Amino acid sequence: MRVLPYGKRAVLIEVDDSATALQLHIDLRDEPGVIDCVPAARTVLVRYEERTDLARLAARAAEVLAQEHTPMPVGEPVTLNVRYDGADLASTAEELGMGVDDLVERHTAAEYVVGFCGFSPGFAYLTGLDPRLHIPRLASPRTSVPAGSVAIAGEYTGVYPRRSPGGWRLLGTTDAIVWDVTRADPALLTPGTVVRFRAA
């Protein structure tokens, strides 16, 4: 773990993997003096109040990392119905050396956890993808990916919350609204949320 200053009242904590970053986020976000806690793939940004004891906060982070953790889900699990009709479904299955049905079965069999959010509002990086489905992004990203597109890239799967450019492999589509500014919490998928995909 490395704790790096990040402006006047924030630190960036570097860790080894997204699971550790998520655990730090869950354990530190309610610590006294913490204003905001934002996980990423291998870091956690912690904003704190001016009078916060930074040494105590760093010690608490080290304590969290030293403990054995069983990841606890945050909020209610979310199941997303997916039409596996994506533009890259067949070519991705072929590149992975499996049939389309096998790819869909593997994608729907896993239980995912939102590791962090980024790229665009509401875009959640879901961890737990079957290692057999790990595959690089497209060599040439699309200029426009439809909202609701369910995709994979690297070790993650996710849902595009709105039409945007993107280079992930498109497996299918869902009608779920994953980002809605009219909701009290606009993001349907927040760090720690357990997610399942179900073939529609």
Image (tube, rainbow, N blue to C red):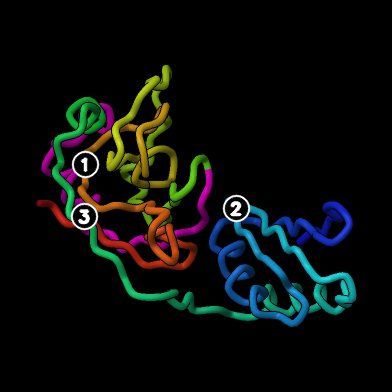
- Mark found first going from the N terminus, 3 or 2: 2
Tell whether 159 sits left or right of 2: left
Q: Which residues are magenta?
A: 94-118
**Number of numbered tags placed on the structure image:** 3
Disc marking residue 40: 2
Q: Which residue is mark 1?
A: 173
Left or right: 54 with respect to 33? right
State whether residue 55 appears in this view.
Answer: no
Q: Give the CA distance from mark 3 to mark 1.
A: 13 Å
In terms of sequence position, does the residue under pointer 2 or pointer 1 come before the other?
2
Q: Say which residue appears at 71% left-offset and 69% top-offset.
A: 35
- For badge 3, the amino acid type reads Thr
Q: Which mark is residue 67?
A: none
**Callout 3 environment at 10 Å: few (<14), some (14 to 19), or many (20+)?**
some
Q: Position of residue 33 (x, y in %)?
A: 77, 77
Query: Does residue 109 belong to the magenta stretch?
Result: yes
**Residue 182 is at least partly visible in this image:** yes
Of residue 46 and residue 99, the one placed in the foreground of this image is 46
Q: Residue visible at 40% across and 30% down?
A: 164
Q: Quadrant of residue 160?
A: top left
Q: Residue at x 16, y 51 (%)?
A: 105
* Marks 3 and 2 in Cβ contact (< 8 Å): no
- In space, the residues marked 3 and 2 are separated at their CA atoms by 24 Å
The answer to whether 25 is drawn above or below residue 123 in the figure is below
Q: Given the image, on which type of amino acid does mark 2 rest?
A: Ala
Label 3 or label 1, whichever comes before in sequence order: 3
Circle 2: element type: loop
What residue is pinned by disc 3? Answer: 108
